[in-house]
């Protein structure tokens, strides 16, 4: 009985959003009479953090504290159109739409404040803590609350904004495939270390070390959520998951979570993650989408690590112990790459 | 265990921000930990009815007859929903953006094309009653020949899955049975190459497995409108699809969702909303249609499997001259979103590398299995698996460190990509450098110095298809393989032959690649087809 | 046929009429109206419907509702004490241990069952305690860390 | 829902109801039957239960152990005198499942890890109704689908200290379904194995004894040389199947590997 260790690497990029049919999202932002803001979307939060990311983007753009913004998702009577939460588009597309809406609302807010302070709107700035002040003369300031009250009851202004972000349809050349598939790309490199049992074919992932380039980490904790959860799913895709264990034969499919294999809490490994930020020129504060790409480098990195450990290539997913064992038998046993 | 490397690309960022970049608590977290986040099913409705569908027992069959008389009389049953009850019983999801032909019925009419295809619905006072009534429906089938393998499906004489796509392939631009990508001249590239490496890769189908299964509740509202609580990932996508199938003006539908128990792509297909709304119209009562876990596992659309063939021509100095890809996306019985996955796949070829000659054909193929759909990274995840396993094999074949090999070929700002757009805002090299540093994976100084910015430590001539291959300086020359140093590294993917013990900078070219390489370009092909039995 | 059932839910006596043969999950959600309990499979394989019955972790989807007569049932709706969150809830928030949140109520109850019996568990104890609870989003690590944090904070309070 | 529930204070009454009622199924821990009810299994029209306290009875004497059919895995784990059964009881599902899953129910489970250990303990099944009163577990398992009788308890001789071994192979840790599991009772008399018992789960449609391997171990030493012949016949008489978790091929391949690791004490519990 022998267990062999090996490391494998993969580098990948990922296109943000879809290029088919045009890719729009809209947002509405408005203030209530006391200077608290609502964002209305039809976008979906399915765990990725749509509500939270757009909330921070809106607060940053308005220049108010995040507590003063609340995001309401997915009511077709109140939320304007959004293509949906897929294709890693939410942060980028919806984020941009929210920024545009918040900019419009901010402009009205600053005009209303200027009228109250009897200065030019251009001379004003937000302090990010709920007040608007004259640049260079901080003692001359007014709270966003008072601005909202004034706008509503004295000036008759709506502190609100509409935003849309549209990536227009990219025609695809049928002959050459020339197209604009995405406006920006996220990047990653992941190194996986595995241990392979050469008697049973069982593979254990021991460690992952990765670097993900995300444009801008709008919220590092949400980025961490995606990268940690996504790399778990990547390992799951690499070694465990299939609803058709004998594909393309359709027999013996799982019908519950006992039969559908995924790594359990006892199958985790340490994951050392580094995050790089090269802002996307068209991203909200440079942000790209990471919801999908986070899993992708794990699959090949694990496959390459298995080769490094025992010298067999498994080119069919998932890399079950059975496939590894068959391959080991076919090549007459393990041959760690370093020894070859 | 997350480190922000702010010093990298710092010159391209304004970090003077107040809210963006803060580790702010999620807006929805308090609701999650107190069990008060409201998902689509967290509504108690008086007189709620329940819809379950009868599913085909055959992968491909003609329906001779359906006898639902006993089911209609079963206790608790309020209504049987037949194909004829569906106002517009043919749709394709992407018809909303004029892509593809309507090819999928909500309830099968004359033919079933996959095992588990919905045939008929039962609306009853409880899920239990609906399930029991389904056991009383008698369907007689004439089984038809079925096809399950993407390449078998393309052979002449293969069973036709759907007359709408008689060749079992999605039709691109009313013209081709596949998506093309053409850049440079791969044959010329192969002819110049020192080595050709040709391999086959197979992705698996994957179940999204969100802990909350697909579902929706349609509630008759005042003024003839319907409120629909839904688990959809795409609110208006589902609303417009449901409106089309029910032949209703979209403003008669009020969709409410936004808090969803996981999706991963499996909640775009609008599997439940159209029939839930139809059932609510036909009964005048609120109706819930939710997939059981078994249905979700076996009949909820999975990630589609792709079979990918890659042929590369590579030089011993590490330059990839040409890459040819043939990919088959297993769409299952209907299109759903797979036609787009093929386009996305083609656009992603040849990966984040600058290769002067690229040729790809990507097919969206119909088979008699559960229709596949979007899943986290679809069109790309499988290709990345294939490309990165291939990159590893290439590095081994030419005896080059796999990270240095990737950095060498990585795209830089200004490089022309195969889909004829300039690369910009690239960062692959920096990711590789940081990961290598963190993992103590030694790479040579010149590779640590390279960058994704214009040029990025390699000199390139020309641009686009006619451009001659990358030249590497100073790491490699065109006359021999790049000089290498011996590494102390625990079993990293290593050369196909032992590296020379720390050769001086003026070392002779390393030993040639494995057997056969001396006689022209050796071919490596898949060792394990792992065909079962 | 409907059967009357009476039991204690989060300390309060509740009574409901349930379908004969109904499981506790459906009765809690549809008859009693406690929507904090989530159903993910009705097969006993996902753990999202985990509740405590007389202090022990149970899968409510596999529990015959009428077998709970006169027993004490605890759900996440009863975890919070008035305005104060339970240490587990605080730790789950601090660790960002939820994404879609659908498995969270079951996770919290499985973790509470552990801490009831073992106030200072090891990492392995925590892993064992949540081994029957599927999470598709987080990769489990933040959840494990959160339960360990909650145990430590419990220790501090006792000290 | 149209399932009748009948609860009986006495097990004997439950047994007669079970044999007389059409479409009646006995509900123990619920892990099998409640799932079937939730899925509206048309074969189930009536659920029969019993609150008979004897079902929860645990009797441990120096020589003999008797467990009521309703004793849960959690109850086994709570009983210090049953420490030799803790590794297998802990292997059955998650903590929540172990609170429900019963010793009796495990005899009917498609993946009966506990029943596999009971096999190597030569357990006897006590029945109520259906005529038969007592049955060796092996015979009971062989006809469990046909039996209309009700299991009241299981009895067996307490194994010698450290004589009982158990290993479960699963893809998902710590608590996945068994790919297979192996139980062994290896009494040692003057350095040699005497009266070995080995049983497998996952190598047939029910837990089965590995009689060939047992014979091959008789009078051998418990070391690499002594077990060699047993390993060579380890899969004799087994008929594993392909399923969603693993293929029959892989089960056959790894069984001797894990049997060796179990016998030589190289498996972590």
Image (cartoon, rainbow, N blue to C red):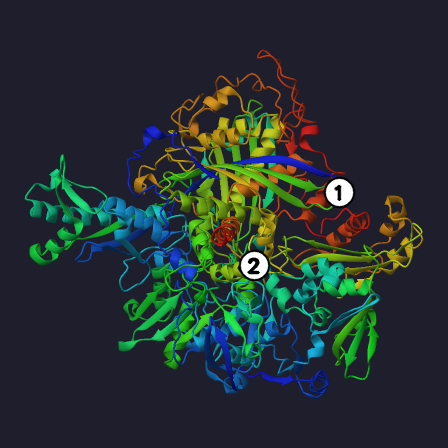
Left or right: B25 as drawn, with respect to C18: left
Left or right: D104 as drawn, with respect to A126: right
Q: Is residue B201 visible?
A: yes
In the image, residue A157 above or below residue D224: below
Location of mark 2 (residue): C114
Query: Mark 1, mark 2: which one is toward the viewer?
Result: 2
What residue occupies the far left of the structure in this picture?
A118
Q: Viewer-proximal residue, A148 or B410?
A: A148
Residue at the (61%, 62%) spot, across then down: D95
- Quadrant hosting residue A253: bottom right
Location of mark 1 (residue): A329
Q: Viewer-proximal residue, C109 or D14?
A: C109
Q: Viewer-proximal residue, D74 or C11?
A: C11
Helix, strand or loop at mark 2: helix
Q: Residues within 10 Å of mark 1 (few under 14, many from 20)?
A: some
- Quadrant hosting residue B183: top left
Q: Is residue A340 visible?
A: no
Residue at the (76%, 59%) spot, across then down: D84
């Amino acid at each position: 009985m022998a267990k062999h260790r090996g490391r494998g690497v993969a580098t990948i990029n990922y296109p943000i959003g879809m290029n088919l049919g045009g890719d729009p999202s809209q947002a509405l932002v408005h203030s209530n009479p006391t200077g608290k803001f609502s964002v209305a979307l039809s976008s979906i939060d399915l765990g990725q953090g749509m509500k939270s990311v757009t909330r921070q983007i809106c607060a940053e753009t308005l220049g108010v504290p995040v507590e003063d913004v609340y995001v309401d998702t997915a009511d077709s009577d109140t939320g304007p159109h959004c293509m949906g939460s897929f294709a890693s588009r939410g942060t980028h597309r919806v984020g941009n739409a929210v920024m545009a809406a918040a900019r419009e609302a901010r402009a009205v807010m600053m005009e209303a404040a200027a009228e109250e302070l009897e200065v030019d709107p251009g001379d004003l700035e937000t302090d990010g803590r709920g007040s608007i002040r004259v640049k260079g003369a901080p003692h001359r300031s007014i709270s966003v609350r008072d601005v909202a009250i004034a706008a509503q009851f004295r000036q008759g202004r709506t502190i609100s904004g509409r935003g849309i972000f549209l990536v227009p349809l990219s025609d695809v050349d049928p002959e050459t495939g020339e197209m604009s598939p995405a406006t920006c790309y996220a990047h990653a490199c992941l190194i996986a270390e595995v241990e392979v049992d050469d008697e049973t074919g069982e593979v254990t992932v021991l460690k992952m070390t990765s670097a993900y380039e995300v444009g801008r980490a709008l919220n590092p904790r949400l980025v961490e959520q995606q990268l940690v959860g996504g790399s778990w799913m990547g390992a799951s895709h690499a070694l465990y998951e299939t609803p058709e264990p004998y594909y393309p034969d359709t027999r013996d499919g799982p019908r519950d979570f006992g039969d559908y294999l995924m790594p359990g809490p006892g199958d985790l490994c340490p994951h050392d993650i580094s995050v790089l930020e090269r802002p996307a020129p068209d991203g909200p504060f440079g942000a790209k989408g990471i919801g999908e790409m986070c899993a992708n480098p794990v699959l090949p990195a694990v496959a390459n690590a298995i080769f490094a450990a025992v010298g067999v290539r498994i080119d069919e997913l998932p890399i079950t112990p059975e496939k590894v064992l068959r391959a080991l038998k076919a090549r007459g046993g393990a041959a760690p790459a370093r020894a070859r | 265990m997350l480190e922000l490397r702010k010093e990298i690309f710092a010159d391209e960022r304004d970090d003077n921000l107040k809210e963006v970049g803060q580790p702010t608590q999620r807006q929805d977290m308090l609701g999650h930990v107190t069990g008060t986040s409201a998902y689509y099913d967290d509504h108690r409705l008086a007189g709620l009815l329940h819809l379950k569908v009868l599913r085909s027992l055959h992968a491909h069959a003609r329906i001779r007859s359906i006898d639902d008389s006993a089911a209609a009389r079963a206790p608790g049953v309020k209504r049987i929903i037949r194909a004829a009850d569906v106002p517009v019983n043919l749709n394709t999801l992407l018809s909303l953006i004029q892509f593809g032909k309507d090819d999928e019925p909500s309830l099968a009419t004359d033919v079933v094309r996959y095992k588990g295809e919905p045939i008929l619905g039962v609306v009853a006072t409880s899920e239990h009653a609906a399930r029991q009534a389904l056991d009383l429906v008698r369907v007689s089938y004439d089984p038809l020949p079925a096809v399950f393998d993407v390449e078998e499906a393309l052979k002449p004489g293969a069973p036709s899955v759907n007359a709408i796509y008689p060749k079992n392939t999605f039709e691109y631009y009313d013209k081709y049975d596949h998506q093309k990508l053409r850049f440079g001249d791969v044959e010329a590239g192969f002819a110049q190459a020192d080595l050709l490496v040709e391999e086959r890769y197979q992705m698996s189908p994957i179940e999204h497995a969100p802990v909350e299964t697909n579902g929706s509740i349609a509630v008759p509202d005042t003024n003839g409108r319907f409120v629909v609580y839904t688990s959809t990932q795409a609110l208006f996508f589902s609303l417009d699809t449901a409106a089309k199938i029910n032949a209703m003006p979209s403003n008669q539908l009020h969709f409410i969702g936004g808090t969803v128990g996981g999706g991963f792509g499996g909640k775009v297909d609008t599997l439940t909303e159209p029939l839930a709304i139809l059932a609510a119209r036909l009964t005048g009562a609120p109706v819930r249609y939710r997939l059981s876990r078994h249905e979700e596992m076996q009949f909820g659309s999975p990630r589609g499997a792709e079979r990918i063939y890659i042929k590369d021509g590579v030089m011993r100095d590490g330059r990839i001259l040409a890459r040819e890809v043939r990919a088959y996306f297993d769409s299952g019985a209907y299109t759903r979103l797979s036609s787009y996955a093929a386009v996305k796949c083609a656009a992603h070829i040849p990966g984040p590398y600058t290769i002067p000659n690229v040729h790809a054909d990507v097919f969206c193929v119909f088979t008699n299995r559960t229709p596949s759909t979007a899943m986290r990274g679809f069109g790309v995840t499988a290709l990345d698996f294939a490309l990165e396993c291939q990159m590893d094999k290439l590095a081994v074949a030419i005896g080059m460190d796999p990270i240095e090999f990737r950095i060498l070929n990585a795209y830089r700002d200004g490089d022309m990509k195969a889909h004829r757009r300039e690369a910009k805002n690239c960062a692959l090299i920096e990711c590789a450098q940081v990961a290598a540093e963190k993992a103590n994976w030694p790479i040579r100084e010149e590779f640590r110095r390279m960058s994704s910015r214009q040029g990025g430590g390699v000199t390139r001539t020309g641009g686009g298809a006619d451009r001659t291959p990358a030249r590497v300086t100073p790491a490699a020359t065109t006359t021999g393989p790049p000089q290498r140093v011996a590494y102390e590294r625990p079993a990293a993917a290593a050369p196909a032959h032992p590296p020379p013990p720390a050769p001086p900078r003026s070392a002779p070219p390393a030993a040639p690649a494995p057997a056969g390489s001396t006689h022209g370009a050796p071919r490596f092909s898949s060792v394990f087809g792992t065909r079962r039995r | 046929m409907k059967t009357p059932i009476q039991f204690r839910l989060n300390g309060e006596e509740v009574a409901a009429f349930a379908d004969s043969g109904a499981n506790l999950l459906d009765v809690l959600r549809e008859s009693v109206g406690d929507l904090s309990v989530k159903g993910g499979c009705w097969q006993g394989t996902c753990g999202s419907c985990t509740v405590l019955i007389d202090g022990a972790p149970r899968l409510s989807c596999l529990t015959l509702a009428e077998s709970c007569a006169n027993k004490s049932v605890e759900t996440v709706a009863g975890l919070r004490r008035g305005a104060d969150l339970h240490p587990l809830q605080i730790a789950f928030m601090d660790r960002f241990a939820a994404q879609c949140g659908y498995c969270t109520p079951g996770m919290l109850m499985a973790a509470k069952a552990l801490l009831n019996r073992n106030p200072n568990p090891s990492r392995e104890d925590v892993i064992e305690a949540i081994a029957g609870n599927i999470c598709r989003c987080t990769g489990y690590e933040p959840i494990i860390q959160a339960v360990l944090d909650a145990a430590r904070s419990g220790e501090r309070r006792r000290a | 829902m149209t399932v009748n529930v009948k609860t009986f204070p006495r097990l004997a009454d439950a047994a007669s109801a079970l044999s007389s009622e059409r479409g009646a199924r006995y509900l123990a821990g619920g892990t099998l039957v409640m799932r079937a009810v939730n899925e509206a299994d048309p074969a189930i029209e009536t659920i029969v239960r019993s609150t008979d306290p004897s079902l929860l009875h645990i009797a441990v004497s120096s020589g003999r152990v008797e467990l009521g059919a309703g004793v849960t895995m959690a109850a086994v784990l709570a009983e210090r005198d049953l420490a030799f059964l803790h590794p297998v009881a802990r292997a059955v599902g998650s903590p929540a499942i172990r609170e429900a899953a019963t010793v009796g129910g495990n005899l009917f489970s498609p993946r009966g890890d506990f029943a596999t250990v009971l096999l190597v303990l030569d357990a006897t099944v006590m029945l109520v109704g259906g005529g038969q009163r007592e049955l060796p577990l092996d015979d009971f398992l062989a006809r469990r689908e046909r039996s209309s009788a009700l299991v009241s308890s299981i009895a067996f001789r307490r194994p010698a200290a450290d004589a009982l071994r158990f290993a479960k192979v699963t893809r998902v840790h710590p608590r996945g379904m068994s790919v297979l599991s192996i139980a062994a009772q290896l009494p040692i008399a003057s350095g040699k194995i005497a009266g070995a018992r080995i049983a497998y789960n996952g190598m047939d449609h029910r837990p089965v004894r590995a009689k060939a391997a047992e014979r091959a171990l008789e009078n051998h030493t418990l070391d690499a040389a002594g077990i060699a012949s047993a390993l060579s016949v380890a899969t004799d008489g087994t008929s594993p199947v392909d399923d969603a978790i693993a293929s029959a091929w892989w089960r056959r391949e790894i069984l001797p590997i894990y049997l060796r690791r179990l016998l030589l004490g190289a498996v972590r519990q």
